[in-house]
Amino acid sequence: MSFGANMLSVGILGLFVSAALGTGVVVVRHEVRASGGDEDRILDLCFWLLIGAIIGARLFDVAQRSAGPAADPLEIFRFWNGSSFYYGGAAAAVAAGAIFIKRNRLPLWNTTDLFGPALAIGHFLVYFGLFFSGQSPNESFGFSPNLVIARPGDGLLGSLPRPNPVALYLACGSFLIFAILLIVKKRRRFDGQVFWTFTLLNSGLQLGLAVSDFSGGRLLYGGELLPETVLNALIIAVSLAMMIILNRRARQVAQWLN
């Protein structure tokens, strides 16, 4: 793929990522206003989450691809040479968010619930961006030889990478998660339920596709579990555990107040 086509691919993905960020902020603002929260504080939190996610994603991605004594430290600024590492960005964003929430004394789980629907709709747009740009999701999914789509740029600056249909499946799954979270939000029984429902369903979606026929069932690589497989399984376990703990705690508080 030529440099021009590579830059076009990055540009298409960047357009969808920008749309995801903008849509996410709009959804968060709606959630804050509906809950009567501090809109300015939450918007500040969005900023720090974004900064943490960008830095973490690039750092983890460069460290993963450029390990070794000859690694070029300037590689982190060459966005056209690679994508970003999803779990690195997520980890950094969680760390930045936790620090901000603690310093500003915001209610932890009530605050995280505000971001559940925004994360889901953001994933929906980003996965569509991955599909149309030809970039591949971080997980080691396979390709479907039967799906071909013409996109702007093909035949102009050189063919863009072939679309990975798994990104399309992930996009559709993320939109379904968004719809489910809207229902959960209306029937929420305890703080944190919306956020942990998102982490549970999102990791379940990725893990399910990893072992399905859609992706060739590549749960293993070289006879060993893929790191993404282990991470998604751990996130599912932690999500279930946290939902049980928070639900029990809410019941105990309700009984004590009565």
Image: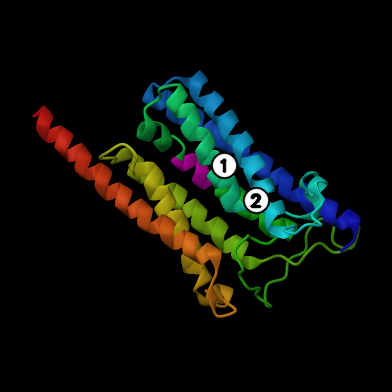
Determine contact: label 2, label 1, CB under 8 Å: yes
Query: Which region is colored magenta?
Result: 116-122
Element on which disc 1 rests: helix
Q: Main secondary structure of the magenta part?
A: helix
Image location of residue 68, percent across then percent down = 75, 59
Tell me which numbered mark, 2 or 1, is placed earlier along the sequence.
2
Residue furthest left in the image:
258
Element on which disc 2 rests: helix
* Residue that numbered label 2 is attached to: 60
The residue at 43%/23% (across/down) is: 33
Does residue 70 sit above or below 226 in this rendering? above
The residue at 43%/27% (across/down) is: 102
Image location of residue 250, percent across then percent down = 21, 38
Name the amino acid type tagged 1: Ala
Is residue 166 or residue 76 the one in the foreground?
76
Label ID, residue 92 = 1
Is residue 27 visible to the viewer in this orientation of the structure?
Answer: no
State the count of labels: 2
Name the amino acid type tagged 2: Phe
The residue at 62%/50% (across/down) is: 126
Magenta-span inclusion, residue 238 = no
